[in-house]
Image: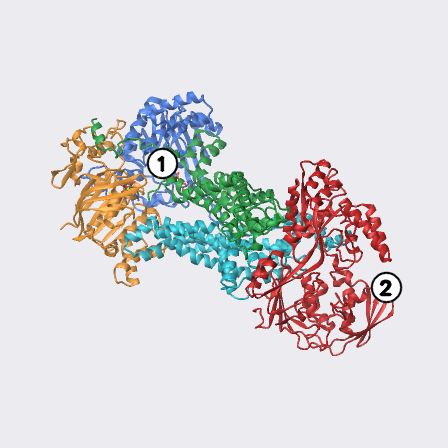
C-alpha cells in the first residue's frame, strides 16, 4: 500500500512538473512580455528597465528555474498588473472558487447518484427514460447560457436569489447550480451504468440467493461497488469544475480564481495566469490522487494488494 | 534418425511481475527448463493444471514471445535465427476460444485469406479459390463464405479458425485447448475433423488440453506439466497404464468417465495450485504429494528415464 | 411428499428477435437425500431452470408452471417476501463462477454471516462461530483467519468452498449447484464434487447439480435429467439412463465423448450432426428431429412422454433402440 | 451589505478594479472616484464655475514663478484621528517624487521639484520650471497622505488600509470585490465639497455589464455607468431607475495605413480607397441607432468643442455607398478587397463598420484585441485599418488630439510631413485666430486625404436608483459626496 | 431425413443451421430504427444539417447584411414582429434567422474539424499505448495525465489571447486539447483487443504490425471511437460557444451561436429572444449529437444476454 502511495505520488509530482513547464512555456513563448508590461507609453529605456526588473533578460531556462523554485514555496512572483504578490492574490480568490466547486460538486453528486441508482434499479421504466432524457438534455445546455437564464428567471424576474457576489450562501446557489449542472449527467450516467453492471453481476445474484432484502442488495452490495468509478469521476469533475468556473464566475461576477484568470489573461498578467494554471493542475492531480486513495479504500482489491 | 520437427531445449520463460515501486520485480517462472521433442506426424499432447505454463509454451512455439533461455528448433533450425514470417508458414495456432480468436469484423473469406494476404500470396481470385477449398476441407458449406463470426456457432467458428491455420499448409498445428469451449457433441466433430486433417495434410499437432480423455483419444505422446516444468513425458499407452509421477496419477484418477458404477475417486490430492512466484522448494509438487518425503522437500528431482519416456520424481520407478 | 415437485415449467424471454422459448414444459421431482443432475448442451436451459426454482430469473423472463412445490409450499403462488425468506434459508444456490460470485467489497466473513443473520436471530459472534465451523467443514484450514480476507485473496477452489459454506449457513433443505466445478481444474473439481456429495449425505438435503459433464453426472448423481433445447428429453435414475440411454440425443451424447478404455484412440467419435434449433418463435414437435437420424413424420407432432422403467422416462415417439455401450 | 436608501448604503458598480487603491499608484477612473471620496487635495476646482477654491490649503501665493506658498487649514484630521499638518504635505510630495514611489502617472507630479515646510501650517512647493497648470494639478491628482501613518505601514500596508482626510473613510479594501467606505464623522465643516449625506458607500467590481444591470434592476447596486445606449434606453422604462446621459470628449474614429507600412501595395495607401471608406459608413445612422444619447457626428480629427478644433469648411463625407463603390472601382478595386479591422472597444460599433464596408465590397475581418495588444500591433505597422477612440486626456485643446495622431510619432499611421508641419505651427502659435486657421488647414488636409475618418463623439450613460439624487459632470467624475437620498 | 413437412409445420422456429443471416449493416439499421433516442438525435441532427448546409434555400437574407435602422426587431410571435424577419434582427439589423442558419455551419464545422484533429491525435496515442504496452504505454499514459491536468478552458483562453482569435485558432486549440477521451478509450479498447486471441493469431500468421493495427485493431475499436467522436463534437461545440462567449473564440461578423449569445447578452433582459434563439439552437444541436452518440453506443453494443 505504501509503495502504491509513493508511486502514485511520484507520478503526480512529475505530472505537476510537466504542467509547470507547459504553463511556463505557453506564456513565455508568446512574445515580448517587457513591452506589454512597460505599457503603451513606455520608451525603449523604460522597456529595458522593466525587462531587467522582471528578470526577463535572463535565458528562458534560468527564468523557468527561478519561477519553479518560487512556485515550490508557493511564491509565484508578483502580478504584473496589481504589482502585488500573486500568492496573496490567489489566497483571496481560492476559497471562493473552492467553495463554489465544492457546493456544485456536492449538489451534482447529491442529485446524480440517487437518480442514477434509481434509474438503474428501475431500468426501462418511465423514470429511467426521463432520467436519461434529462441527461442528454442536461449535457446539451451550455453553462453560460444556463447561468444567464437562471439570472433572468430567479434573480431578475422572481427576485428569489441575488444576481452576483459572494456575500452570503444564497449568493452561491445559482452559480453552483450552473456549474454543477454539467456534471450531473456524467455522474448520473456513470452511476446508472455502474449500477446496471453491478446489478447484473454474479455477486448480486449471490446476494439475492441468500434471501437478502432488496434494499440490502441495492445499498450494501450494489451501490458500494457502483460508486467506485464515480469517486474517480467526481474528482475529475471537480477538477473540470474549477477550470470551468471561469465561465460561471464571469457570468455571476464571482471574484474567484476563474474571474481572476480571465481578467489576467485579458491584462496579459502572466504570472497570475501561470500560477492559476499550475494551481488548478495541482489541485486536479491532488484530487485524482485522493480519489485513488479513496478508491483503494473502497475497493479492497486495490487496498489489500 | 530423422530430425524432429520441433525441438525444445531447456526452454525457460520468466515474466517479471511488478510488485510496486520499491520492491524488486518478482520473477515468475512460467516455463522452467522444458525440453521436448516432437516428431513429424505425431500428436504431442500437453496436459496440466491452469497456470502451469501450457499457453506460454505454445506462445513461444508460435514465436509470439521469446524464451528467456533455451532454444526452440524447427527441423533443427533455431527459431531465433528464422524470420518470424517463415516460422509462421510452418507453425500455425488454433486457439481455445473460437469467439475471441476470430476478428468479428471480418467475413469468413477475409479471415481465411488473411495469412495469404499477410504473406502476399496469390491474387484475390486465387485466394478466393483457396478459401473455398479450405471451407470444403473443414466441412463448412461454401455459402458461409460471406458470413461473419457473429453469425456462426462455436463449432463453425472453430472450423474457420482451423481453415485459417491450414491455408498456408503448415507443418505443425499448435492447438491450445481447441475444444474446451465447445459442447461435447461439437467437440467430437472437431476432434474427428482434426484427425482427418492430420491424415490429409500430414500434420504434426502440439495439442494442449486439460481433458485427459481427449488426450488419450488423440495423442501419441503426452507431456504433463506442473508449475512450469514437465513432470512426466511418456507415450500414451505408457502414461495411461503406468503413470509414474504422483501428479500424473492424480490427474488420471480425476478423469470422470460416464460410468455410474464407479462413483467418485477416493484418491484425491490435497491442496491447490501453489503460488508460481514463490514455488515450493525441492520438488514443486511435494506439498500436495501423498508420498512426499524429506528428500522431496529438499531436492528437486531430475528427469528419470521410465518406460517410453521420462518422469521427474525421485520415486518414479 | 417430494421435497421438490416441478410440473411443466416454462420460461419465455422476450428478445429483440422475438419470444425465446428458453424452457419448455420441464417436469421433475426431487426427494430429500437425492442428487438430481441436470445435463445438456450450452443454452439448453439448465441455468434458467434452476434460477426459476429460486425465483431469481432475469426480470424480463416469464415463468409459468402447472405447479411448482417446494416441501409443500407453492412456489408459483409465493410472494416476493416469502421467496426472500425461503432463499438462503431453506433453499440455497451455488453458482458457476467462483471468481465473480462473491462481492469483492466485503470480507468472506461478512458475506458468510450475512445470510445467517438475515434468516436467524443470532448474534454476530454466533454467526461467526458457525461460519468458522462450516469453513472447516468444507476443508478450509485456518478458517478463523480467513473470515477477514477478501475474495480476491482466495484461489478459485477456496472461493467455491466459501460459496458452499455460504449455502450451508442455514442448513437448507435444497441446494442447487449450477456448474459448480466447470471453472476449476480437474483435481480441484474432484475435491469439490466429493465435498458436495459428502455434505449432501451428511445433511440429508436434496441436491440439484447442473452440469454439462456426463462424467460428473454419472459419478455423483442419483437421478439425471437430460435437457435439450429447453425440454427435458430423458430423465431417470442414473444407472438406468447411463445403462440404457434411450433418447436418440442421449445416445448421441454418450457416443460423442471419448472414454479411456472404451473408445479406441484415433477412431472417429460418434457425432450428432447439425445444430441446436433456434428457440425463438413456436417450435412444434421434437426439437431434436432435424439432427436425429431416425426422425419420421411423427416427430413433428406433439411428443408423448414415455415410461421406460421405474422413474425412467423419455420424450420421443420412437421405440428405444439399445446402443452398444 | 444591501444597497439602498433604507440601509443608507450607496453601492456603485463598475467593471474594473484599480490595481492599487493608493491614488498615486493606479490610473483607473475607478481609482480616481475613490480618491476623491477618501482623500483631499490642497485646492479644489469648482466643477461648475471652474474657479479654484481653498480646500486643505486656505490660501496660496506665488513667491516667484517656480515657488508657490500655501497656507494650510487647521483642525483637519485624518481618518485615524491624527491632525493634518505641513509634514503631511511635505512628505506626500517629496515621497511621490522619489523613484522608489513608482508613481504610475508621472506627469501628474513631475512638474514639482519638491516641497518644504515653512511652519506647521505653511508649505512651499518648488517647481522645476514655470508651469501655468500647477493649480490645476494641485486640485486634481495630488491628494495628501498621512505622513506618520504611511511611514509606519509602507505602501503595501497603506493600500490595504488607507486613510486620508476626505469625506469618506475606507473600512475595507477587498481584492477583486471592491471597496467599502463610510462617512467620516470627523470631516471638517465648511468644505467646498459640502457635507456628505449618504452614510455608507460601497464600490463593487462587477466586470460584466449585464450583471451590473441586473444588480441595478434587482436593487443589488444603486448606481452604474457606461451603460450602452440600448440598455440605457431600456432602463429608462424600468421603474425606480433613473438614466442620465451626457456627451464626453471621447471621439471614435478610423485610422488607415496610409503610409503603407503593412504592405507596399496595401489598398489603404490609395486616397480613393480611404475616401470610399468614408462614403461607405453611415455615421448619422450609427449615432442615431447605435451610439445615441448626446453623441454627435464628427467631421474633423478632434473633438469639436476643443479649442482650435473646427469643422467649418473642412470637407465632409456624406453616406453614399454608390460613390464609395465608384471610388473603389476607380482605385482599381472593382471587386473590393480583403482586409483586417482592428478594434478594442465597442465591438458593436466596429462590427457595424465591418458591415458597412462589406456592403461596398470591402471584406474586413474584425480583429478584436485588448488595447495594449492592438496598440502594439499598430505601432509595429501591422494594422491596415483601425477602430480607435481618443479622449484627449480631458484636455480641452485640439492639440491634445492631433498631436497624438499626426505628428509622425509612433501612433501616426499616415505620416504626412505636410500635415505635421502645419500642426507644429498651430500648436505654438499664440494668436487665436491664426491658430484656428492653421488647424483648419491641417484638419482640411486630413479630411481631404482621408487619413483619419472621425466618426462621432461618445456619450456616457449613468443609470441609478430613483431614490438617489445624483448629478453628473462633464469630466466623467461622479462625486458621490454630493449625492443624497431623495 | 424427412423433415421437410415437419419444418413446414413450424415455420418460425429456426432449424436452419445458419442462423438468420443478417449483415452487420442490416442489424445496425434494425436496432437503430428501434432506438427512440438514436432516431430523435438523427432527425434533430439531420434537420440542423439540412437547414444550415442548405441555408440559402431557406432564407433570402444575407447573414452579414446590416441595416442599423432596423435593429433588434423582435421575432414574429412578438407583437412587433414581422414575417420579413421572422426571428427578428440583431443589434446591427441583420436577419436573425439567416445568421442562425449560417451559424450552424460554423458550429458544425468547428465540431467536425476539432474532432477530426483530436480524434487522430488521441487515437494514434491510445492505440500505440494499448497495443505496445509497457514503456510506450507508461509514457502515453503520462502524457494523458498531463493533458487532463491542464484546465481546458483556461489554457484555450490563454492561447487564444496570445496567438489571436480566429476560427482556425479555435479549431487548432480545441483539437490539441480535446484528444484525451479518444486516447483513453482507444487505449483501453486496444488493450482488450491486443490481448484477444485473434490478434495473437494474426501475429502467428505473420501479419506485420501495421497490418495488425489497421486491419485487426482499428476496425474493432471504431465503434467506441465513433461514439466518443460524437460526444467530443458536442463538447467542442459547447467549448467554442463558451470561448466565443468569453470573447476569445470566433470573431465577428461570423455568426457563431456562442458569439450570438455573447452579443445578445447585452439585450437579454429586455429582448430575451436574442439569447434564447441561439441558445435553443445550440441545445438542439448538442442534444441531437449527444442522443445520436448515446444511441450509437447502445446500437453498436454487442448483444448481451441481460
Ligand atoms: N504476460 C504475462 N506476464 C506475467 N505473467 C504471465 C504472463 N502470461 C502468463 N503469465 C503467468 O505465467 C503462468 C503460466 O501461464 P499460462 O497461461 O501459460 O498457463 P496455462 O497453463 O496455459 O493455463 P490455462 O490452463 O489457464 O490456460 C501463470 O502463472 C500466469 O499467471
Ligand atoms: N437474460 C437472458 N436474456 C435472453 N436470453 C437468455 C437470458 N438468459 C438465458 N437466455 C437464453 O436462454 C437459453 C437457456 O439459457 P441457460 O442459461 O439456461 O442455458 P444453460 O443450459 O445454463 O447453458 P450453459 O451451459 O451455457 O450455462 C439460452 O438460449 C440463452 O441464450
Ligand atoms: Mg492456457
Ligand atoms: Mg448455465
A83 relative to D182, above or below: above
| Residue E210 seen | yes
The residue depicted at 73 percent of the width and 73 percent of the height is: D192
Is label 2 on the same chain as label 1? no
Please name the color used to draw chain C: orange
Front residue (pair A163, B180): A163
| Mark sitting on residue D130 | 2
Residue E128: percent from left, percent from top: 51, 39
Q: How many neighbours does mark 2 have within 10 angstroms: few (below 14), some (14-19), or many (20 or more)?
A: few
Please name the color used to draw chain E: green
Q: CA distance from mark 2 to mark 1?
A: 100 Å
Q: Which chain is cyan?
A: A
| Mark sitting on residue B97 | 1
Q: Is mark 2 within 8 Å of ligand 1?
A: no
Q: Which chain is red?
A: D
Q: How many neighbours does mark 1 have within 10 angstroms: few (below 14), some (14-19), or many (20 or more)?
A: many
Amino acid at each position: 500500500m505504501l509503495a502504491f502511495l509513493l508511486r502514485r505520488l511520484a507520478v503526480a509530482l512529475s505530472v505537476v512538473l510537466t504542467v509547470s513547464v507547459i504553463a511556463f512555456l505557453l506564456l513565455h513563448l508568446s512574445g515580448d512580455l517587457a513591452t506589454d508590461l512597460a505599457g503603451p507609453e513606455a520608451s525603449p529605456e523604460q522597456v529595458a528597465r522593466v525587462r531587467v526588473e522582471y528578470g526577463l533578460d535572463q535565458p528562458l531556462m534560468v527564468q523557468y528555474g527561478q519561477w519553479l523554485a518560487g512556485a515550490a514555496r508557493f511564491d509565484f512572483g508578483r502580478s504584473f498588473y496589481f504589482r502585488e504578490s500573486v500568492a496573496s492574490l490567489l489566497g483571496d480568490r481560492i476559497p471562493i472558487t473552492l467553495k463554489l466547486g465544492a457546493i456544485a460538486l456536492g449538489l451534482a453528486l447529491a442529485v446524480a447518484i440517487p437518480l442514477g441508482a434509481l434509474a438503474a434499479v428501475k431500468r426501462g421504466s418511465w423514470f429511467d427514460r426521463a432520467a436519461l432524457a434529462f441527461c442528454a438534455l442536461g449535457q446539451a445546455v451550455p453553462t453560460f447560457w444556463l447561468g444567464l437564464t437562471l439570472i433572468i428567471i430567479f434573480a431578475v424576474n422572481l427576485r428569489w436569489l441575488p444576481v452576483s457576489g459572494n456575500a452570503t450562501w444564497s449568493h452561491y446557489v445559482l452559480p453552483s447550480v450552473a456549474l454543477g449542472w454539467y456534471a450531473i449527467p456524467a455522474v448520473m450516467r456513470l452511476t446508472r451504468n455502474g449500477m446496471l453492471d453491478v446489478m447484473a453481476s454474479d455477486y448480486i445474484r449471490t446476494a439475492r440467493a441468500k434471501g437478502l432484502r432488496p434494499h440490502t442488495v441495492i445499498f450494501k452490495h450494489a451501490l458500494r461497488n457502483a460508486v467506485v468509478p464515480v469517486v474517480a469521476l467526481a474528482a475529475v469533475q471537480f477538477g473540470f469544475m474549477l477550470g470551468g468556473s471561469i465561465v460561471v464566475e464571469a457570468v455571476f461576477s464571482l471574484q474567484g480564481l476563474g474571474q481572476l484568470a480571465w481578467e489576467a489573461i485579458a491584462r496579459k498578467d502572466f504570472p497570475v495566469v501561470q500560477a492559476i494554471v499550475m494551481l488548478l493542475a495541482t489541485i486536479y492531480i491532488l484530487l485524482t490522487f485522493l480519489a485513488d486513495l479513496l478508491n483503494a479504500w473502497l475497493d479492497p482489491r486495490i487496498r489489500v494488494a | 534418425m530423422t530430425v524432429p520437427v520441433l525441438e525444445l531445449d531447456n526452454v525457460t520463460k520468466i515474466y517479471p511481475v511488478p510488485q510496486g515501486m520499491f520492491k524488486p520485480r518478482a520473477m515468475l517462472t512460467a516455463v522452467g527448463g522444458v525440453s521436448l521433442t516432437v516428431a513429424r506426424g505425431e500428436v504431442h499432447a500437453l496436459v496440466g493444471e491452469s497456470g502451469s505454463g501450457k499457453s506460454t509454451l505454445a506462445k513461444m512455439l508460435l514465436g509470439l514471445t521469446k524464451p528467456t533461455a533455451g532454444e526452440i528448433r524447427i527441423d533443427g533450425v533455431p527459431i531465433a535465427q528464422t524470420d518470424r514470417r517463415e516460422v509462421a508458414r510452418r507453425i500455425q495456432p488454433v486457439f481455445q476460444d473460437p469467439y475471441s480468436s476470430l476478428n468479428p469484423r471480418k467475413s469468413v473469406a477475409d479471415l481465411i485469406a488473411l495469412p495469404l494476404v499477410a504473406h502476399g500470396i496469390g491474387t484475390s481470385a486465387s485466394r478466393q479459390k483457396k478459401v473455398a477449398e479450405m471451407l470444403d476441407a473443414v466441412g463448412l458449406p461454401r455459402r458461409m463464405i460471406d458470413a461473419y463470426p457473429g453469425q456462426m456457432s462455436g463449432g463453425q467458428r472453430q472450423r474457420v479458425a482451423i481453415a485459417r491455420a491450414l491455408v498456408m499448409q503448415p507443418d505443425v498445428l499448435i492447438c491450445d485447448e481447441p475444444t474446451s469451449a465447445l459442447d461435447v457433441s461439437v467437440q467430437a466433430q472437431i476432434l474427428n475433423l482434426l484427425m482427418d486433417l492430420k491424415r490429409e495434410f500430414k500434420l504434426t499437432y502440439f495439442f494442449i488440453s486439460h481433458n485427459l480423455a481427449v488426450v488419450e483419444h488423440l495423442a501419441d505422446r503426452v507431456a504433463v506439466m506442473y508449475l512450469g516444468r514437465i513432470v512426466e513425458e511418456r507415450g500414451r499407452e505408457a502414461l495411461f497404464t503406468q503413470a509414474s509421477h504422483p501428479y500424473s496419477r492424480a490427474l488420471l484418477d480425476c478423469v470422470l468417465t460416464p460410468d455410474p458404477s464407479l462413483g467418485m475417486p477416493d484418491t484425491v490430492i490435497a491442496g491447490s495450485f501453489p503460488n508460481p512466484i514463490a514455488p515450493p522448494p525441492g520438488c514443486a509438487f511435494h506439498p500436495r504429494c501423498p508420498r512426499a518425503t524429506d528428500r522431496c522437500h529438499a531436492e528437486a528431482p531430475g528427469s528419470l528415464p521410465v518406460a517410453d519416456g521420462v518422469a521427474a520424481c525421485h520415486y518414479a520407478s | 411428499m417430494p421435497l421438490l415437485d416441478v410440473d411443466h415449467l416454462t420460461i419465455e424471454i422476450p428478445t429483440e428477435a422475438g419470444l425465446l422459448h428458453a424452457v419448455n414444459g420441464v417436469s421433475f421431482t426431487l426427494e430429500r437425500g437425492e442428487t438430481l443432475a441436470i445435463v445438456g448442451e450450452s443454452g439448453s436451459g439448465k441455468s434458467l431452470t434452476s434460477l426459476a426454482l429460486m425465483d431469481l430469473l432475469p426480470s424480463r423472463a416469464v415463468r409459468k408452471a402447472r405447479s411448482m412445490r417446494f416441501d409443500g409450499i407453492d412456489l408459483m403462488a409465493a410472494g416476493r417476501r416469502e421467496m426472500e425468506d425461503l432463499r438462503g434459508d431453506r433453499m440455497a444456490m451455488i453458482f458457476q463462477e467462483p471468481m465473480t460470485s462473491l462481492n469483492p467489497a466485503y470480507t468472506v466473513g461478512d458475506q458468510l454471516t450475512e445470510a445467517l443473520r438475515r434468516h436467524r436471530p443470532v448474534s454476530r459472534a454466533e454467526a461467526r462461530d458457525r461460519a468458522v465451523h462450516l469453513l472447516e467443514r468444507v476443508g478450509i484450514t485456518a478458517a478463523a483467519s480467513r473470515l477477514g480476507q477478501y475474495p480476491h485473496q482466495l484461489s478459485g477452489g477456496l472461493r467455491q468452498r466459501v460459496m458452499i459454506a455460504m449455502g450451508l449457513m442455514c442448513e437448507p433443505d435444497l441446494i442447487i449447484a449450477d456448474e459448480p466445478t466447470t471453472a476449476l481444474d480437474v483435481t480441484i473439481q474432484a475435491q469439490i464434487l466429493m465435498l458436495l456429495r459428502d455434505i449432501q449425505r451428511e445433511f440429508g438435503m436434496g441436491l440439484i447439480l447442473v452440469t454439462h459433464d456426463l462424467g460428473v453426472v454419472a459419478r455423483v448423481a442419483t437421478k439425471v435429467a437430460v435437457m435439450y433445447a429447453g425440454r427435458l428429453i430423458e430423465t431417470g435414475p442414473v444407472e438406468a439412463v447411463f445403462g440404457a440411454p434411450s433418447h436418440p440425443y442421449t445416445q448421441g451424447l454418450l457416443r460423442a465423448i471419448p472414454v479411456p478404455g472404451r473408445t479406441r484412440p484415433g477412431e472417429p467419435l460418434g457425432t450428432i450432426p447439425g445444430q441446436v434449433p433456434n428457440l425463438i418463435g413456436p417450435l412444434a414437435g421434437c426439437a431434436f428431429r432435424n439432427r436425429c437420424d431416425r426422425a419420421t413424420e411423427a416427430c413433428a407432432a406433439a411428443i408423448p412422454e414415455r415410461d421406460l422403467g421405474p422413474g425412467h422416462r423419455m420424450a420421443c415417439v420412437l421405440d428405444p433402440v439399445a446402443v452398444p455401450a | 451589505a444591501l444597497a439602498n436608501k433604507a440601509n443608507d448604503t450607496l453601492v456603485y458598480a463598475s467593471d474594473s478594479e484599480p490595481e492599487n487603491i493608493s491614488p498615486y499608484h493606479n490610473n483607473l477612473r475607478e481609482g480616481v472616484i475613490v480618491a476623491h471620496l477618501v482623500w483631499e487635495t490642497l485646492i479644489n476646482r469648482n466643477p461648475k464655475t471652474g474657479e479654484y477654491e481653498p480646500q486643505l490649503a486656505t490660501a496660496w501665493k506665488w513667491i516667484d514663478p517656480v515657488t508657490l506658498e500655501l497656507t494650510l487649514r487647521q483642525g483637519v484630521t485624518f481618518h485615524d484621528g491624527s491632525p493634518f499638518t505641513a509634514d503631511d504635505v511635505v512628505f506626500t510630495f517629496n515621497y511621490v517624487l522619489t523613484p522608489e514611489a513608482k508613481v504610475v502617472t508621472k506627469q501628474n507630479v513631475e512638474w514639482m521639484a519638491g516641497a518644504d515646510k515653512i511652519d506647521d501650517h505653511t508649505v512651499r512647493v518648488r517647481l522645476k520650471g514655470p508651469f501655468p497648470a500647477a493649480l490645476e494639478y494641485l486640485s486634481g491628482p495630488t491628494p495628501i497622505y498621512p505622513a506618520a501613518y504611511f511611514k509606519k505601514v509602507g505602501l503595501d500596508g497603506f493600500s490595504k488600509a488607507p486613510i486620508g482626510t476626505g469625506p469618506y473613510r475606507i473600512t475595507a479594501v477587498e481584492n477583486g470585490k471592491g471597496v467599502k467606505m463610510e462617512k467620516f464623522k470627523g470631516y471638517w465643516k465648511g468644505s467646498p465639497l459640502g457635507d456628505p449625506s449618504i452614510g455608507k458607500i460601497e464600490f463593487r467590481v462587477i466586470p460584466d455589464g449585464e450583471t451590473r444591470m441586473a444588480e441595478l434592476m434587482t436593487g443589488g447596486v444603486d448606481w452604474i455607468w457606461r451603460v450602452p445606449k440600448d440598455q440605457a434606453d431600456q432602463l429608462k422604462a424600468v421603474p425606480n431607475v433613473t438614466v442620465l446621459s451626457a456627451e464626453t470628449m471621447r471621439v471614435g474614429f478610423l485610422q488607415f495605413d496610409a503610409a503603407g507600412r503593412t504592405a507596399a501595395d496595401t489598398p489603404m495607401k490609395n486616397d480613393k480607397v480611404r475616401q470610399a471608406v468614408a462614403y461607405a459608413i453611415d455615421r448619422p445612422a450609427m449615432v442615431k441607432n447605435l451610439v445615441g444619447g448626446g453623441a454627435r457626428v464628427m467631421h474633423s480629427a478632434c473633438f469639436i468643442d476643443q479649442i482650435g478644433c473646427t469643422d467649418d469648411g473642412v470637407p465632409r463625407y456624406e453616406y453614399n455607398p454608390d460613390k464609395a463603390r465608384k471610388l473603389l472601382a476607380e482605385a482599381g478595386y472593382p471587386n473590393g478587397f480583403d482586409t483586417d479591422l482592428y478594434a478594442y472597444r465597442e465591438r458593436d460599433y466596429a462590427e457595424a463598420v465591418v458591415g458597412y464596408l462589406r456592403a461596398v465590397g470591402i471584406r474586413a475581418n474584425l480583429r478584436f484585441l485588448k488595447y495594449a495588444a492592438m496598440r502594439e500591433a499598430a505601432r509595429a505597422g501591422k494594422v491596415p485599418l483601425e477602430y480607435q477612440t481618443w479622449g484627449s486626456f480631458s484636455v480641452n485643446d485640439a492639440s491634445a488630439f492631433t498631436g497624438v495622431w499626426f505628428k509622425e510619432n509612433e501612433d501616426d499611421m499616415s505620416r504626412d510631413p505636410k500635415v505635421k508641419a502645419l500642426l507644429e505651427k498651430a500648436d505654438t502659435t499664440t494668436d487665436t485666430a491664426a491658430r484656428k486657421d492653421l488647424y483648419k488647414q491641417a484638419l482640411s488636409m486630413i479630411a481631404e486625404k482621408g487619413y483619419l475618418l472621425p466618426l462621432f463623439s461618445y456619450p456616457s450613460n449613468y443609470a441609478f436608483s430613483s431614490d438617489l439624487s445624483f448629478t453628473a459632470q462633464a469630466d466623467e467624475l461622479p462625486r458621490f459626496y454630493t449625492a443624497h437620498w431623495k | 431425413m424427412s423433415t421437410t413437412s415437419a419444418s413446414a409445420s413450424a415455420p418460425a422456429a429456426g432449424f436452419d443451421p445458419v442462423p438468420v443471416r443478417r449483415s452487420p449493416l442490416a442489424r445496425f439499421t434494425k436496432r437503430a430504427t428501434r432506438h427512440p433516442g438514436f432516431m430523435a438525435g438523427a432527425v434533430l441532427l439531420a434537420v440542423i444539417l439540412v437547414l444550415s448546409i442548405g441555408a440559402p434555400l431557406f432564407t433570402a437574407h444575407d447573414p452579414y447584411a446590416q441595416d442599423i435602422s432596423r435593429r433588434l426587431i423582435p421575432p414574429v410571435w412578438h407583437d412587433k414582429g414581422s414575417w420579413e424577419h421572422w426571428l427578428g434582427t440583431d443589434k446591427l439589423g441583420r436577419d436573425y434567422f439567416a445568421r442562425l442558419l449560417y451559424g450552424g455551419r460554423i458550429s458544425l464545422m468547428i465540431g467536425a474539424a476539432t474532432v477530426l484533429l483530436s480524434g487522430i491525435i488521441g487515437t494514434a496515442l491510445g492505440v500505440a499505448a494499448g497495443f505496445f504496452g509497457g514503456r510506450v504505454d507508461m509514457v502515453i499514459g503520462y502524457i494523458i495525465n498531463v493533458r487532463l491536468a491542464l484546465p481546458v478552458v483556461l489554457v484555450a483562453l490563454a492561447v487564444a489571447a496570445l496567438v489571436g482569435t480566429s476560427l482556425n485558432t479555435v479549431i487548432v486549440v480545441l483539437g490539441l486539447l480535446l484528444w484525451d477521451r479518444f486516447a483513453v478509450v482507444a487505449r483501453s479498447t486496444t488493450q482488450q483487443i491486443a490481448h484477444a486471441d485473434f490478434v495473437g493469431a494474426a501475429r502467428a500468421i505473420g501479419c506485420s504490425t501495421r497490418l495488425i493495427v489497421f486491419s485487426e485493431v482499428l476496425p474493432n475499436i471504431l465503434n467506441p471511437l465513433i461514439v466518443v467522436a460524437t460526444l467530443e463534437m458536442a463538447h467542442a461545440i459547447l467549448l467554442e460557444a463558451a470561448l466565443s462567449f468569453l470573447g476569445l473564440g470566433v470573431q465577428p461578423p461570423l455568426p457563431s451561436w456562442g458569439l450570438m449569445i455573447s452579443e445578445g447578452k447585452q439585450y437579454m433582459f429586455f429582448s430575451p429572444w436574442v439569447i434564447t434563439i441561439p441558445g435553443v439552437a445550440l441545445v438542439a444541436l448538442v442534444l441531437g449529437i449527444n442522443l445520436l452518440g448515446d444511441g450509437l453506443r447502445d446500437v453498436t453494443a454487442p448483444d448481451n444476454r441481460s
